Amino acid sequence: MSCLFCKIVEGKIPSTAVYQDEFLYAFADVNPQAPVHVLIVPREHIASLSDANEKNRELLGHLLLAAAKIARDKDLAKGYRIVVNTGEDGGQSVEHLHLHLLGGRQLSWPPG
Ligand code: DGP
């Protein structure tokens, strides 16, 4: 498997772990865009949100609840943002579904 995030999930490429369980691995983004920037990645390889289906319903909910838990653990009581870049126009650069958890500063809207 040549997928970068699969290699990170498997520990073949080093990363800074933030949280993990049976279904997901969360780690610090190598190029942080905010004081807190965590990537939440399912252990199962799903290329993007567009490739998810009904079988992934529980997993998708689990990813979001994990994001909220990590935000609590990181003291992001003032707020945070979850981003799922999807496809070329969405700015997705790694083809393995992932949530960005961004926080620790005032985030602007709309995004670029
Ligand atoms: P996206 O553009 O939404 O596909 O986000 C991919 C993110 O992955 C981007 O913010 C940078 C991050 N990233 C890319 N390569 C690595 C890596 O080797 N290690 C870590 N920790 N993050 C990476």
Image (cartoon, helix red, strand yellow):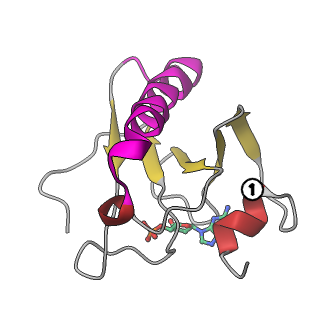
* Residue 80 x, y percent position in the rendering: 35, 34
Residue 60 coordinates in the image, percent (x, y): 41, 39
In the image, what residue type sits under mark 1? Val
Q: Relative to 20, is 97 above or below?
A: below
Q: Quadrant of the C terminus?
A: bottom left
Identify residue for label 1: 9
Q: How many marks?
A: 1
Badge 1: residue crowd in 10 Å (few <14, some 14–19, many ≥20) = many
The image quarter containing residue 2 is bottom right
Does residue 59 appear to the left or right of 109 in the view shown? right
Q: Is residue 17 above or below residue 46?
A: above
Q: Could you say which is closer to the camera, residue 35 or residue 97? A: 97
Q: Is residue 16 magenta?
A: no
| Dominant secondary structure (helix, strand or loop) of the stretch shown in magenta | helix
- For image coordinates 64% across by 38% down, the residue present is 23
**Foreground pick, 74 / 90:** 90
- SS for dot 1: helix
Residue 68 among those drawn in magenta: yes
> Seen in the image, is 80 located left or right of residue 1?
left
* Residue drawn at the location 45% of the way across and 25% of the way down: 65
What range of the chain is rendered magenta?
Answer: 52-77
Furthest residue toward left? 110
Residue 51, image x and y in percent? Answer: 37, 65
Closer to the camera in the image, 33 or 3: 3
